[in-house]
Amino acid sequence: METVPAGVPQGTKLGPWLFIMINYLEVTSSDGVFKYVDDTTTHEIVKKGDDGQAQTLLDEINDWSIANKFRLHPQKCKELRISFTRDDVSYKDVSIDQSTLNIVE
């Protein structure tokens, strides 16, 4: 198996095949999953005082990816945290294969 060092060019014949593959992805521990041709977004709603399950979500997606001969690229994966609380909330960092994801604003 070879690694492809690039994304999927728009308009290629590979796009529909990737969409069919990614369409089978199910993340049972997520509050929602948004799927695109070669991109997936998942989210969770964390109530005040609860711990987030972001690492569990990411592990589930990573396990599915490995089982289906895909690999997640940790440097291309990002974490966005949105909080509506007045207090600063601290969550554990999430990682793929010991690579911590960048948090974006």
Image (cartoon, rainbow, N blue to C red):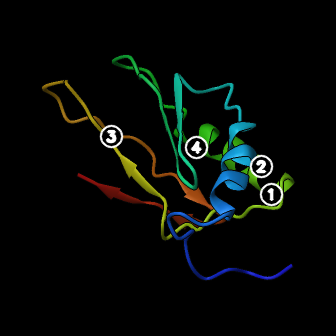
Nearest to the observer: residue 11 or residue 56: 11
Q: Residue at x 77, y 46 (%)?
A: 64
User: Under tag 2, what secondary structure?
Assistant: helix
The secondary structure type at the circle numbered 4 is helix
Q: Nearer the viewer, mark 4 or mark 1?
A: 1
Amino acid type for the residue under numbered disc 4: Gln
Residue at image mark 2: 63
What element does badge 3 sit on?
Answer: loop
Q: CA distance from mark 2 to mark 4?
A: 12 Å
Q: Earlier in the sequence, mark 2 or mark 3?
A: 2
Cα distance between the residues tagged 3 and 4: 14 Å
Question: Which residue corresponds to the image point at 23% horizontal and 51% vertical from the top-left?
Answer: 105
* Residue 22 in which image quadrant: top right
Q: Which residue is mark 3?
A: 90
Quadrant in the rendering for residue 49 = top left
85 horizontally vs 4: left or right: left
Q: Are marks 1 and 2 in contact (CB under 8 Å)?
A: yes
Instruction: Decide: is 76 above or below 60.
Output: below
Q: Amino acid at mark 1?
A: Ile
Inter-mark Cα distance, 4 to 1 = 16 Å
Q: Is residue 98 left or right of residue 78?
A: right
Front label number (3 vs 4): 4
Q: Which residue is mark 1?
A: 66
Looking at the rendered structure, which numbered label has been put on residue 38? none
Marks 4 and 1, the one that precedes in the sequence:
4
The residue indicated by pointer 4 is: 55
